[in-house]
Image (cartoon, rainbow, N blue to C red):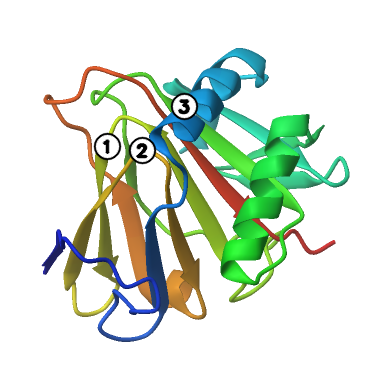
Amino acid sequence: MKLFEDDIDASKNLLPQNGTVNYYDKIFSGEQADFYLDNLLQTIGWRNDEAVIFGKKIITKRKVAWYGDQPFEYTYSNTTKQAFPWTKELLELKTIVEKVTNETFNSCLLNLYHSGDEGMAWHCDEERDLKKNGAIGSLSFGAERKFAFKHKKTQEKVEMLLEHGSLLVMKGTTQTYWLHRLPPTKKVFTARVNLTFRTIVE
């Protein structure tokens, strides 16, 4: 199932079952989106991501950063990160996303993909640190990239294009029943920054 539609209805659930995903299209003007992209590239404390797989440490080309209300610890891929304090612009973006979605968040995981060669494999965000069935607000700046969901049992797939300045929200039982990924592509040569606003439960 592909969802490349001209008229985006943010209230429409893009998943056929077992979860809720809403796409808000571009919530920023082109000028605003360009500003935030440039700011995030320059001011965020980017670091190469690390994962421990079968006891071996893997360093990714993709870079990440973790911010929050407090120095929350967040563990995934057998590594633990401690949150930096919010920047002015990140707080602005958090406030905007909360207003648009009517949700609240206390942290944000950012990913920097330098080009289409970098992506993310199938996974779900259901770590113990995260609020169970809590909303995740995903902002995209920079290169347009395809994003995909796959049902864990039926293997049904849903694909969409995430645009510069757009917002995608995953909530309910989405993480329980669906995997998602950012597939690599040879057609994209510019950077994409993704911000996933989350709720950590201590």
Q: Which mark is residue 91?
A: none
Q: Position of residue 55 (x, y in %)?
A: 52, 34
First in sequence, mark 1 or 2: give its number.
1
Q: In the picture, which quadrant includes the N terminus?
A: bottom left
Residue to which mark 2 is pinned: 164
Amino acid marked by disc 2: His
| Element marked by disc 2 | loop
Q: Position of residue 109 (x, y in %)?
A: 61, 41
Amino acid marked by disc 3: Leu
Amino acid marked by disc 1: Glu
Q: CA distance from mark 2 to mark 3?
A: 14 Å
Q: Position of residue 96 (x, y in %)?
A: 64, 53
First in sequence, mark 3 or 1: give its number.
3
Image quadrant of residue 103?
bottom right
| 36, above or below 14, in the image | above
| 177, above or below 181, in the image | below
Image quadrant of residue 198?
bottom right
Residue to which mark 3 is pinned: 112
Q: Which mark is residue 144?
A: 1
Confirm or deny contact between disc 1 and disc 2 (CB under 8 A): yes
Q: CA distance from mark 1 to mark 2?
A: 6 Å
